Every structure is written in C-alpha cells, then in structure tokens.
Image (cartoon, rainbow, N blue to C red):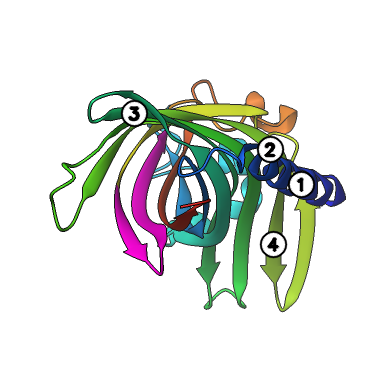
Amino acid sequence: MAMGCRAAWVTGAVLLIVVGGLAHLEGQVSVKVGVAWSGYRASHGDERVHEGEDYRPYLGYEVERLQEGDAHPAMRLQLGVGYELPLRGWVSLQPELHLALRGVGWEMAELYGEAYRLSVTYAQFPIFFKLRAPEGWRVRPDLLLGGFGSLTLGARRTLTERGASDTRSLSNVRAFDYGLSFGVETRVPLLSRTFSVEARFEWGLGNAMSQPPGYTDLFDDPGKINVVALSVLFGWRLGS
C-alpha cells in the first residue's frame, strides 16, 4: 500500500510538471478535477462455477458470500491535465494524463457487518478525437470519442469482519489496462476564463486481473474482469 501511495504522489508531481511546462500554450491546456463512479465487471467463463458474476477466481474465497449481494460502485477522485490540438475545422486531438482511482465493494450487514472494498490507483492516458460544436451555439456540447491506456500504480483490498478491518495489497491486478472512452463536454465562459463540465464513460477491454496461483487450478475458464467507470469532471483552460 505504501508503494501505491508513493506512486500516486509521483504521478501528481508529474501532472504539476506537465501543467507548468505547457502553461505557455494559452487556451489549449486544461486542468481537470472531478469524481468517478467505477466498478469491475466479471464476465462468465465456466458457467458451471457460479450463478451470476463470480469474482472468486481473481479475489479468492473471501468474497464468496459477499458477492451474492449487489456490488457497490466506488466513488473516487480523478484529476488530470489535457492538451487540445486543432486538426481541421471542427475536429481536434486531445491527449490527456490522469490520476484515476477505481474500485468496487460489497457489503452484507446481516453477516456481522461484513464488507469488502477493492481500490486501485492508475496513471491513465486517455486520447480523444474532439468534435466541436459550432461557435454560434449558445450551449456547445463537444463530443469526445477515443480510448485510454492505464498503468497500475497500486492496488489493495480491505475486508471487514465483526467490526475488524484487514487491509492488504493485491499483486494480481495487471500492470496495464486499456479500453474505450467517450463523453460530452460543454464550455462555460466565466469571469474572463473558460471553464468546462464533462461526463465521460469508460469500458475496459483488457482483463484487469490475473489469477492468483492458489486459485488457477480450480477454474478451467475463469472469464474476465473489466473495469467500467463514469466520470464527471470540471476543468479550466489555462491562460484563457
């Protein structure tokens, strides 16, 4: 867990350096901050193993009873910086760098207050084609179409049983993930600056986890774990 915290601080420092280095590109660099609601979806592998989504091949038997309940999305911080590069007409390219926190959890109060929380920290690299709305529109909803790659900075799980919590790092979260992302952004001029509000959805395409050695032999086809997230971000354009 300490390694994940250090990596998060390093990523934050990199974000500040990137902002400082690009700040002279007025009107094209944006700083963003917001929240993301995320989860990890388990696809079916061997249908005989379990009815519904089965996380045991990747998270172990400590989630066997808890996963019978509904999974709760994790609400986590997200912050980043982006650079908009005009291409032609109303199309531009927008690469970004984000510190993105993802997770999922289960809770069953009737089982002595048992709960399970998974938290993963990523350095995320989204890249979008931005389709800008015409200048004359009063409200300008720009479309964001693209994808992302993510590097895992740290992962941990917290298991609560009978009022006692146990937090451990997870080594089987894969180092790299990727997926599709799309969203809508609108710009709001205010006090001589340009602010933005956007909502984006992410669907991971890679298998976000590998099986721990102790569980591999129990499942011929464990399926996949995919990350999903819905983010709401507020941004401001530097120098505008």
Residue name at image x 72 percent, y 50 percent: 156
Q: Earlier in the sequence, mark 2 or mark 1?
A: 1
- Residue 184 horizontal/vertical position (percent): 28, 47
Q: Which residue is mark 2?
A: 21
Tell me the number on the disc at residue 92.
3
Amino acid type, label 3: Ser
Amino acid type, label 1: Ala
Left or right of 62 in this view: 86: left
Cα–Cα gap, marks 3 and 4: 45 Å
Q: For the magenta stretch, what is the residue range?
A: 185-204
Mark 3 secondary-structure assignment: strand
Query: Can the viewer see residue 101 in this picture?
Result: no
In this orientation, which residue lies closer to the viewer: 108 or 100? 100
In this orientation, which residue lies closer to the viewer: 120 or 56? 120
Residue name at image x 57 percent, y 59 percent: 77
Cα–Cα gap, marks 3 and 2: 21 Å
Q: Earlier in the sequence, mark 3 or mark 1?
A: 1
Cα–Cα gap, marks 2 and 1: 12 Å
Q: Which residue is mark 4?
A: 159
Mark 1 secondary-structure assignment: helix
